[in-house]
Image (cartoon, grey):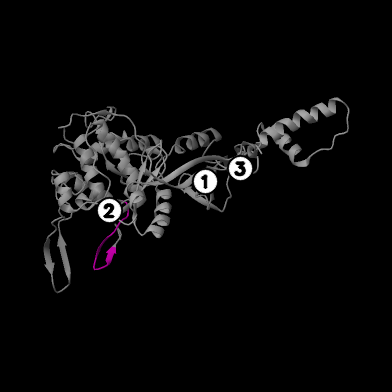
Amino acid sequence: MKKIAKYEIIKKYRILKAEIQRRGLKFIPNVLLDKALFKRAMIGIDVESLGDVVIENYISISGPFVKSSRKAKVVDLVIKDDEENRDGDLEEQISEAVQGETKKKCRFTYDKAGPPPPYIPLFDKIIRAKRETSKVEISKPETTEEYHRIPVRDCKITATIDISEKEGIKALYCGKEKEIATYLFDVDRFTMKEAKAWVKEHSKRIEKGATPHVKLSLMPEDERWNPKDISDSKIIEAILGRDPADGEWTAQMNANAKKVCAWWDGKGGKIDAFKLKIGRRVPITDKSGPLKYNWRQTASRMAILMGARGGVDIPDRQRKPTYNRIAKVYKMFDKPVPEFKKYTGDELKKMFPEEKIEKIDFRFKKVDKKEHIVGGIIYEPDKEDTQGDEASAKEIWKALKNYMIKGKSIKVMHKGKEPGG
């Protein structure tokens, strides 16, 4: 018996109902079908009638495991999707399930056409239609006695938080979704127009993790990232468009940084939130110059991601998407992309001969055995650090002063005083 889709039933029911009523015959309504017709009339669609979308064989086992599960060292899993849609959370869940069953590690590849035979289908992907038709709406901005209230999303509010006590900005926060539902602006400090402008500017954000790939021009392959006479802080200032210490961090600064940095920690407001810089301005300190990718910096950051120079501190599930981001720049330079896997120190030295794979040589310059105090050089001027950057003595001194001014403390034997204390 042929299965009839719900929307076909509703369509035929509507035609039949109209004809019965036209003829003046007695009509016995069907509650469920009339409800669906009402939703279609009021909202323009009955979502449940769309039915579910199924992508068959979305995840399959391919490769040596299919031929001999006993001899295979890993389980090759093929996901029927584009590489750009890689989902670290999904891979983690699938790996846990498959490893628990096979006791072998998993290796993922993406192919929109799916794997060639032979293969073992594991999972279908089902996109389930919502069972209720509804319209999610956000209430309009309004002004109360204390605040200009500007809603930005519909979610369950669990707390009121301070965005900027100094500026007079609060927000209604949704704990489960970890999102802001409504911004609250002090009416004595903002007009409604100013409040809307602030929300528009600060709502331009990117998600935590690998930044999206953008097509930029390429610098000559042999051109350095950081000439010795230019400090890294000046390069960063040019990338951002202005000195990050000069006023509030803007959405445009976020946008500039994400173009030439492969990863972002989601916090914003500081260049330290961005990691793995692979490009800069050309000319190097021209704040209005074009942003371009630098090959030597790109290769260096790939090496660091793979473990060179002590590696980089980002979540494990974000490493593959970040690798994909840098790999796309490799392809723009027409360079072979290293395989994404764990490498030994010797393997890294062969792959990235210009990189410093060895550990940092830190030596104590002063030792007080009686007081158990040791001291040494943390950052040496005009010497490349583990991230491939260097700074002049003037820049290091400036950073030290900023550190102290911002209220940090330097401790000796776990004791320290705040600046001015």
Circle 2 crowding by C-alpha within 10 Å: few under 14, some 14–19, many from 20: some
x and y, in percent, of residue 251 in the image:
40, 36
Look at 64% across and 40% down and name the residue there: 48
Residue behind mark 1: 180
Q: Which residues are magenta?
A: 406-416
* Badge nearest the viewer, 2 or 1: 1
Left-right relation of 85 to 402? right
Left-right relation of 138 to 60? right
Residue behind mark 3: 130
Using the image, determine if residue 258 lies above or below residue 102: above
Look at 17% across and 49% down and name the residue there: 347
* Cβ atoms under marks 2 and 1 closer than 8 Å: no
Q: Which element type, helix, strand or loop, lies under badge 3?
A: loop
Q: Is residue 243 visible?
A: no
Left-right relation of 130 to 409? right
Amino acid type assigned to the residue bearing label 1 in the image: Ile
Counting residues from the start of the chain, the first of labels 3 and 1 encountered is 3
How far apart, in angstroms, are the residues tagged by discs 2 and 3? 55 Å
x and y, in percent, of residue 192 in the image:
55, 35
* Badge nearest the viewer, 3 or 1: 3
Q: How many marks?
A: 3
In this rendered view, identify the residue nearer to me: 298 or 360.
298
Which image quadrant is residue 113 in? top left
Residue at the outermost bottom position: 370
Look at 27% across and 67% down and name the residue there: 414
Amino acid type assigned to the residue bearing label 3 in the image: Lys
Please tell me whether residue 408 belongs to the stretch shown in magenta. Answer: yes
Using the image, determine if residue 30 lies above or below residue 11: below
Circle 3 crowding by C-alpha within 10 Å: few under 14, some 14–19, many from 20: some
Counting residues from the start of the chain, the first of labels 2 and 3 encountered is 3
